[in-house]
Amino acid sequence: MAEATPQAVLGDFGNATFTYAGTTSTFFKRDGLFYVRTDGRDGKLETFRIKYTFGVYPLQQYLIEFSDGRLQALSVAWNARPTKDGGQRWFHLYPAERITKDDELHWTRPAQNWNFMCADCHSTGVRKNYDAAADRFQTRWAEINVSCEACHGPGSRHVESAKAHLPARLDERRGVSWIRNAASGIAFRSRPRESEREIEVCAQCHARRGQIADGYEPGKPLLDYYRPALLSGPLYYADGQQRDEVYDWGSFLQSKMYANGVTCSDCHDPHSGKLRAEGNNLCGTCHLASKYDTPAHHNHQPASAGAACAACHMPTATYMVVDPRHDHSLRVPRPDLSVTLGTPNACTGCHKDRDAHWAAATVKAWYGGPPQEFQPFANTAFQPAIARATALADLDASTNQASIDALAAGLRDRSPLVRLGALRALGRAPLDARVSLAAPLLSDPLRTLRIEAASLLAPVPVDQLRTNAAFERAAAEFVESQRYNADRPEGRVNLGTFEGNRGDMSGSERDILAAIRLDPFFIPAYVNLADVYRTLGRDADGARVLREGLRLNPGSAALHHALGLALVRMQRTGDALGEFQRATVLEPGNARFAYVYDVALKSLK
């Protein structure tokens, strides 16, 4: 990130134009400043000053400041690649769609807001400073870009150590060497990795996560400030490969490299941003080249594209139109899983004229069958923790005692990710099981798990909680985390739902209405507000709210389904049937919608 100066701006601002979805944007300079004339919040052409540049290569975006302190990232970006590679031109980040003012992805909307979406990773020492009462930001940073303190923590500690003549903190990597096993040709660490510090420092920005508080510093627990995503769709494919932008950490935690002690800086120089060696030479620092960088291993011509280690074990997916990024799960290609699960594989990623059946047969002919991977059970110790966490999060514990037993074991697991996955599934468990299993997590060492437990236990009457003091502390942390994200509709809905579960219906209504004002296209706000009105016996108001949501989101199956339920409670079953039908047609894979529609059909004969 940098101020928009002639030195920082890469794009063509010489009255260049770009047309998208019927709008022609014009980029120009005036009095030494940079401007764009494009569609604003109301869809009409306005002139905006470019305040900051964002990124350098392979693309550069531009930030526009609004009077309420919001910085918004323009969706028309500059392709910074050379002309021969298709660069040196303006392009839209959603070329296959038609993003206009009413779309959640429009550049003026919350999904493109820098204060929440971008700032924490692209600047150092960020404080969001959102004022919910005024609906304004006063976001500040210590340094505009990523500086030393982003990874090393406050420089004051270094100065204090020097003044006190204290030795520098012992680096966890100091004295570690990699020793190659002669039989396998693979290196192993001279001593186990003793800390997650380095990987969590990288994960602050290289993980798909939600932020729950300001103030993270290197060395502090990641899950005290961030709530990480697990390997669920649509972020990941069913086998754990990257799908949406997941920024490496969740992928790397699945890998055998991570399991055997590899850290980010074994491959990447954190100061130059470059790899420690190029091409297969990087892999050859640990994997014996005479065994693995040969046709006997990869079955491709030497030095060909198919002989590149990363081509098979780290295939790329392209994000933001022009930015290919490697999958860091470093997995063995599994075209046999493509046949059964429909997942991508590196083989047909290159051999586009062939299908997964061909690739699976070829791999079987070369190697005798698919590799012996980890066993796919949530309670298998050899499965990566993030995969076990995801398996637990997907369990249906509504009636199945075996599932509840698995969650109970997961909640005692040493891995915080496994505990988090178990907590996420526990919301579907019977209330008595939820109380007995989630209560101990109210005192978990990590804030993310404490607030998850508090959210789960919010509907439980106080007299049923033997750990009432622990609940009140964790509940206060939950409320604080949602107020920190009060600039987001999901933060307001979470807070309103929590208040409703605790019996504060006026507070619940207030915060969910605020969510709708923040983002009228946020569907869960309408559904949850209608549920508040159901609790208050105001189904007519609930139906009105849902119809308002459908006016803006006519294709929402969830809104049609919720409106059908409200109409049933209002004794308007005929009208309800039509809403249930629309929900099922719009989302045919939703079993609950289909079941309710079936019950409605039966009840009306």
Image (cartoon, rainbow, N blue to C red):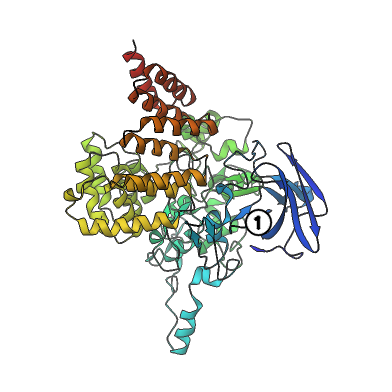
**Viewed as shown, does residue 428 lie left or right of 294?**
left
Residue 157 seen from this side: yes
Q: Considering the image in quadrants, where does the C terminus appear? A: top left
Residue under the point 72% across and 48% down: 46
Residue 198 in percent (x, y) is at 45, 65
Q: Is residue 10 above or below residue 601?
A: below
The residue furthest right is 14
**Viewed as shown, does residue 467 lie left or right of 97?**
left
Residue 270 in percent (x, y) is at 56, 66
Numbered disc total: 1
Viewer-nearest residue: 94 or 547: 547
Viewer-nearest residue: 331 or 483: 483
Q: Is residue 238 above or below residue 446?
A: above
Residue 36 in percent (x, y) is at 74, 52
Residue 230 seen from this side: no
Viewer-nearest residue: 91 or 539: 539
**Label 1 residue SS:** strand
Residue under the point 19% across and 51% down: 465
Q: Considering the image in quadrants, where does the N terminus appear? A: bottom right
Residue 383 in percent (x, y) is at 35, 47
The residue furthest top is 605
Going by the numbered disc 1, the residue's amino acid type is: Leu
Q: Residues within 10 Å of mark 1 (few under 14, many from 20)?
A: many
Residue under the point 63% across and 52% down: 73
The residue to which callout 1 is attached is 63
